[in-house]
Image: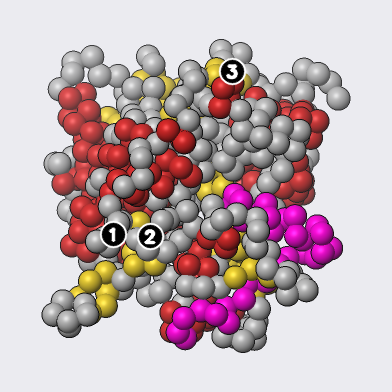
Amino acid sequence: MNQQKATPRFPGLIAPFDLRSTALLRTDVLVIGSGIAGATAALAAADDGCEVLLVTKADLDETNTAWAQGDIAVAQLPEDSVEQHVADTLKVGAGIADERIVRSVVGSAAQAIDWLERLGTTFDRAPSDDGTANHLELSREGGHTYPRVVHSHGAATGQEIQRALVAALRGHPRITVRPHVFVRDLVIRDGRCVGVVGLQNGGAAGAGPGGAHREAIEIAIEAGAVVIATGGSGQIYRETTNPTGASGDGHALCFRAGARMVDCEFVQFHPTTLYIAGASRFLISEAVRGAGAVLRDRNGERVMQGVHPMADLAPRDVVSRAILDRMVATDDTHVYLDLSDVDGDPHARFPSIARICSTFDLDLAKDPIPVRPGAHYFLGGADTDDQGHTNVPGLFAVGEAASSGLHGANRLASNSLLEGAVIGRACGRTAAAEARALERSPARAGLPRRADGPELASDPPRLLHDDLLYALKSLMWRQVGLRRERAGLGDARARLAFWHHYLTRGPLASRHACELVNMLTVASLVTEAALQRDESRGTHFRKDADGRDDARCCRRIYLERASDGAIRCTPGPLLTPSDRAPAQP
C-alpha cells in the first residue's frame, strides 16, 4: 500500500460551498441534535432569551436518548450519598475521570431529576412503607454500591424523557425546530465557528448509512454560537446497540474544525445486546441483572462466577470481555441471560424488553435470552469543560459528542443521561450569553461568501458505499473492538487511511457519502488513540499490554487536526489514579 495513502489526511471541509447559490438562515444559537443534551441546551438558551434553531438529521425523537433503556443515577437511599456516587464514578473511571467534573455533575443529580419531572417526565414511583408518600423507585446497575437508578415504565426511561423533551421543544416560542437537516461542515472564520453548511432533506426519515435518499438541498446557517449534540458513533462497529443514525457526525465535525479531541480510545461495549441472527440488535437493560438475572453459557455454567467480586454487576468492560472469552471457549456466538431468579414478574418489571423478546417467541420468565456485547457508548469526544466549551471560540459540544471528564476510561451506568441534563443546561446558558455578547460586538464576522473543499480526482473511482460501510464495521469489530493489539491496530490505521483517501477524492453530494467520511474519521481517531495507549485501562484492552500502568500511562490522550490534515497526538500530564478517590463513606 502506498505509504502516503496509508497516512490519514483530513480536510477542514469535506465539500465546497458558495453562498451565492445557497439558502442562508441566521439564528442566535444553533443546536445540532435533539437528544437529552441538545434538547436541554436548546431549552436553556431559549429560556435565557435567545432565538434558537435546533436541527436534527432525522425526526426529533430518533435519538440515542430515545433508545436508552438505561436510567438516571441519583443517590436517594438513607445509606447512600452523593459522596458514594462520586466514589463509584471515579472508581469505574479508572484514573482518567476528572474529580471536579464528577462532583459537579453528580452533585446536581437531584436537581436534574426535579427539572425533568417539571418538564413532564414521569418516573416510576412506589408508596412509602407507611403509605403516606410516593418515592422514586430505585434499581441497581453495574458498578453502583447501592440502588440509585431512577427509571420510567421499567426500562423505557429514554423514550419517556425524549417524549417530554420533544413536547417542550415544540412548545417553546423562541425555539425553531428543523428536522431532516444533515450538517456537513462547520465553518471557521478568523479562528471562530460562525456557522454550518448542511443538506436539507439529505436522507429519508430515519435513514442512516445505507438508507433511502431524497434529493438534497444545500443550506447554510449563521449563528452566534453552535452547540454540537449529535450523539454517538456506534455504527462504526458491526455489533452495536445504537440506532442507524449514530455515525459519529459530531465527533468528525469537531475534529475537522480544529477542536481538540480526547479519550477517543475508550469505547464502552454493553454486555447484553439481544442477539438473534438477522434481527436488529436490541439492548437488554443492565437493570435486568440488577434485579437478579445472571449470565450463563450454553452448558448452563455461570459466566461471571469467580471473574469479579461483583459478579454479574461488575463494570461493563469486565462483563463484556468475560462474555467474549466464554463465547470463544464454548465455540458459541452468544451467551444467555437467565431471568429465572428475578424477584417478581419480569414481564411487569420490564414490559418493553418482554414485548421485544415475545416477537421471537421468547418468554422472559422461562426462556434464556441470547445476548452478546455490542458497541454502546463513546467516552471520547471534543475536549470540554462543565459548560461545553471547546477550544474553538463559538463552538460548544455536549453529551456523547463531548468528553467532559465525567466518565474517564469507563462510564458508570446511568451517568450519561445525567450528564446530558446537567451539562446541557449549563452549556445552553453559556452559549446564549456568548451569542448575546457577540451580537453587540462591532467586529462580528459572518459566514464567508465561499470556501473550497478538498481537491477532487479528475476521474474519481466509482464506489459501492454499502460495501465500504460493511468493510469498515467488520474491521473495527475485529481489530479495534473489545480486544486490541499493536499489529492489528497498525493494519487498521493504514486501511482506514486508504479508504478515506479514495472516498474523499470523489464528490460528496449525499448524506450517505458524508456519513461514511465521518465514520472513517472517527474510526481513525479511535484507532490512533488506541495505538498510543499501550496499556489496558477501563474499556481499552490491549492483548499485548495486559495491565494498567499508572506510573507511566495514567494520563489522557489528546488528538488534533494538524495543518497538513494529519492527526497530531499529544499525551496529557499524569493524573491521580482512581484508587486515590475519596475514602468510602
Applied colour scheme: secondary structure
Q: Nearer the viewer, mark 3 or mark 2?
A: 2
Residue wearing tag 2? 146
> Which is nearer the eye, 508 or 239?
239
Q: Which mark is residue 64?
A: none
- Residue flagged by tag 3: what amino acid is it? Arg
What residue is shown at x 39% (from left), y 16% (from top)?
A: 191
Taking the magenta stretch, the answer to whether it contains residue 335 is yes
Q: Earlier in the sequence, mark 2 or mark 1?
A: 1
Q: Which residues are magenta?
A: 316-345
Q: Nearer the viewer, mark 1 or mark 3?
A: 1
Q: Determine whether label 2 and label 1 are within 8 Å by CB.
A: yes
Residue wearing tag 1? 79
Q: Is residue 544 above or below residue 468?
A: above
Q: Is residue 500 above or below residue 210?
A: above
What residue is shown at x 18% (from left), y 18% (from top)?
A: 441
